[in-house]
């Protein structure tokens, strides 16, 4: 939150955040005599606008899963076969990715999103996003979960209003990773 380039929330916000993070990790790696810093970036990440990938490239970060051209589905399959815990955990992007480009990122907004998503998780939803449009929450769920959300409408509305939203909406298109990037294409 200390970087105004990040909190201004431009379309390349992830580049600034990732650059700051990688510089700190590289300094830590050097201090501990580690030869490399690696990330879990994979080939599936290249199918959408991901400015953080450019930061990794600029700082010579190793990306073994991407270098091996492994997709998220392949990584999950391999992880399951190896008996690794968490192989079936859904992807979780940074909470800032729930905020439209140009809308300021602040702790109040991030807290509102976090509380709302924790509530959806407590109801048993596994894949979701609460997109923050000021005082309006736009909930994205898997299409097969939309009817369950309607059945629990009153609980969801109450919880999200308690989190700080004035309006609570359900996105009928359902969950889709990178939906905030859809406005970049227009």
Image: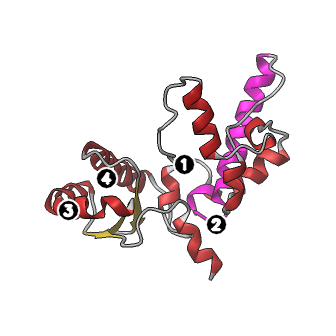
Q: Is residue 22 left or right of residue 57?
A: left
Which tag is nearer the camera, tag 1 or tag 3?
Answer: 3
Asked if the residues shown at circle 2 and circle 4 are in contact, with their CB atoms under 8 angstroms apart, the answer is no
Q: Which residues are magenta?
A: 6-32
- Along the polypeptide, which appears first: circle 2 or circle 4? 2
Q: Is residue 107 above or below residue 136?
A: above
Percent across and percent down for residue 28 are 73, 25
Q: Which residue is mark 2?
A: 11
Residue at (59, 37) in percent of width and height:
77
Residue at (17, 61) in percent of width and height:
151
Q: Which residue is mark 4?
A: 116
Secondary-structure class at tag 2: loop
Crowdedness of circle 2 by 10 Å Cα count: few (<14), some, many (20+)? some
Q: Nearer the viewer, residue 16 or 122?
A: 122
Crowdedness of circle 3 by 10 Å Cα count: few (<14), some, many (20+)? some
Give me the C-alpha separation between circle 4 and circle 1.
21 Å
Asked if the residues shown at circle 4 and circle 1 are in contact, with their CB atoms under 8 angstroms apart, the answer is no
Asked if the residues shown at circle 2 and circle 3 are in contact, with their CB atoms under 8 angstroms apart, the answer is no
Q: Which residue is mark 3?
A: 157
Q: Nearer the viewer, residue 42 or 70?
A: 70
| Prevailing secondary structure of the magenta residues | helix
Secondary-structure class at tag 3: helix
Quadrant assignment, res 112: bottom left
Give me the C-alpha separation between circle 2 and circle 3.
30 Å
Q: Nearer the viewer, residue 8 or 146?
A: 146
Q: Is residue 164 left or right of residue 98?
A: left
């Amino acid at each position: 939150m200390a970087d105004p380039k990040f909190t201004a929330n431009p379309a390349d916000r992830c580049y600034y955040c990732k650059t700051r993070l990688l510089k700190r990790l590289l300094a830590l790696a050097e201090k501990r005599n580690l030869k490399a810093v690696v990330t879990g970036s994979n080939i599936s990440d290249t199918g959408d606008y991901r400015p953080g990938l450019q930061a990794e490239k600029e700082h010579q970060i190793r990306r073994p899963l991407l270098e091996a051209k492994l997709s998220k589905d392949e990584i999950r399959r391999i992880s399951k076969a190896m008996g690794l815990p968490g192989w079936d955990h859904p992807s979780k992007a940074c909470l800032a990715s729930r905020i439209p480009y140009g809308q300021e990122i602040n702790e109040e907004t991030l807290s509102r999103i976090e509380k709302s998503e924790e509530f959806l998780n407590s109801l048993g939803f596994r894949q979701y996003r609460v997109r923050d449009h000021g005082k309006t929450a736009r909930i994205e769920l898997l299409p097969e979960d939309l009817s369950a959300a309607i059945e629990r409408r009153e609980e969801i509305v109450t919880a999200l209003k308690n989190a700080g939203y004035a309006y609570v909406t359900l996105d009928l298109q359902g969950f889709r990773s990178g939906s905030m990037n859809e406005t970049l294409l227009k």
